[in-house]
Amino acid sequence: MTSLPDRKRLHVITWGCQMNVYDSGRMTDVLAPLGYAPAETPNGADMVILNTCHIRDKAAEKVFSELGRLRRLKEASGGHMILAVAGCVAQAEGAEILARAPYVDIVLGPQTYHRLPEMVARASRAGGAVIETEFPAEDKFDHLPDSTTPQGVTAFLTIQEGCDKFCSFCVVPYTRGAEQSRPAAAILREARHLVAQGAREITLLGQNVNAWHGEAPDGSTWGLGRLLRELANIPNLPRLRYATSHPRDMDDDLIAAHRDIPALMPFLHLPVQSGSDRILEAMNRKHTGTDYRRIVDRLRAARPDLALSSDFIVGHPGETEADFEATMALVRDVNFAQAYSFKYSSRPGTPAAGAPRQVAEPEKDRRLQALQALLREQQASFAQSCVGLTMPVLFTGPGRHPGQVVGRSPFLHPVHLQGHADLIGNEVLVRIVAAHPNSLAGTLVQERLIA
Ligand code: SAH
Ligand code: SF4
Ligand code: F3S
């Protein structure tokens, strides 16, 4: 008879993108058979994983300062705590992490999470540190168990990983490796499992999610449009989303999917980075501002209520005032419901890092402020335009105040209202009565839409 392993406490700290959030869940799943259960704090934990992001400046410095804090907790545990560094900084820095923080037990890259149990065993046995930052031949998804910790009403599902686009400024192709698409059957299976665990909205994830081209059950190859059509047939899954997309991979079938699939939410995050053709070329984006506007027009023709979100970088090497004005013009033309904007940050090893004509920091600051003021204005006026409308809201949890529940609009706004907790997990028609800077308030107009 096999005895159950001792119960141990695992604390995971997650930085970076949605894929890191998903990965942290999968690392938790893979450690569950060893007796590790999630813990809210690192105090007294048997194992702590720091899941890191390398996308912008000072990423490594932030990791080392957090590790300094965790070192004290490890010492307080008499050295018993296993300390692991995962994610994109682990991939990029590898052995450097152990050189600067010798108290770390495990350094593992994003493609090796399925090997964690074996790494834990090696680290506990040998007492020496373990590094795994190779890109292994086997596919980690074939070796990861089904999730045991439900994600909740809204869930992430990685369908594609890695990037072959090599934008001038970006570390992702180096930290996540080449583009890889999971087979459709594995994705459909995981989606059904998430729904059985209570998910009512699934966001498909990929660094370039619309570059997904996976093996279909009949051996042919599907694109993302086709995959979405299949996912939309899963019972009790009223909502689908996908992120993050690249404009170049927005094909006809995917645009048609926005017209044909009611479950596909009318909100799309489609990063453009810049509105200047010169800078888009320097960024190696392989599309122009006009291409982007055309794609947006076609998407809006397919789904007239589509709200758009984007990412912008100001101050890429070579960006002049005229280039920046072209970005402002594109923002005015498209009108975004929401957006993220960043100052260009030089990343070692990327082509833009060594490029001439770097933009001075105060100039980047000024451009970022001007862009963010315009984006904030558009975001506020979009939220205001929702007031008075009736829309389906998917309730995800209790609100901050007693008697309140919070849900998600089709456009990703948090929506608060006074209501009973049994609304959670249901999609219900709500009338929007007020727009706040980061959320909407509503009242119920109808009982349950779905069981
Ligand atoms: N795969 C996605 C984006 C991944 S990174 C895409 O292609 O759109 C998320 C965002 O971070 C990017 O869209 C970009 O706006 C920003 N970003 C990436 N590298 C950056 C850098 N070196 N400096 C500033 N912002 C950066
Ligand atoms: Fe980075 Fe460009 Fe790939 Fe996006 S498409 S992950 S910005 S290299
Ligand atoms: Fe960061 Fe890696 Fe995601 S660099 S944004 S955690 S892919």
Image (cartoon, rainbow, N blue to C red):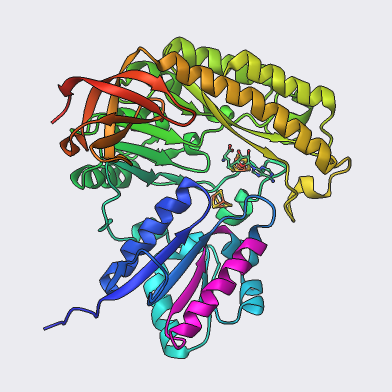
Counting from the top left corner in percent of width and height, residue 362 is at 82, 40
Residue stretch in magenta:
61-88
Left or right position of 187 against 195: right
Most extreme residue toward the left is 1
Left or right position of 160 against 392: right
Report whether residue 315 is seen. Answer: no
Residue sitting nearer the eye, 438 or 278: 438
Residue sitting nearer the eye, 223 or 389: 389
Is 87 covered by the magenta stretch?
A: yes
Quarter of the image where one finds residue 154: top left
Counting from the top left corner in percent of width and height, residue 288 is at 69, 22
Q: Quadrant of the C terminus?
A: top left
The residue located at (55%, 67%) in the rendering is 133
The residue located at (65%, 26%) in the rendering is 373
Q: How many discs mark residues in the rendered view?
A: 0
Residue sitting nearer the eye, 273 or 134: 273
Counting from the top left corner in percent of width and height, residue 339 is at 56, 30
Counting from the top left corner in percent of width and height, residue 358 is at 85, 42
The residue located at (53%, 62%) in the rendering is 135
Report whether residue 133 is seen. Answer: yes
Is 134 covered by the magenta stretch?
A: no
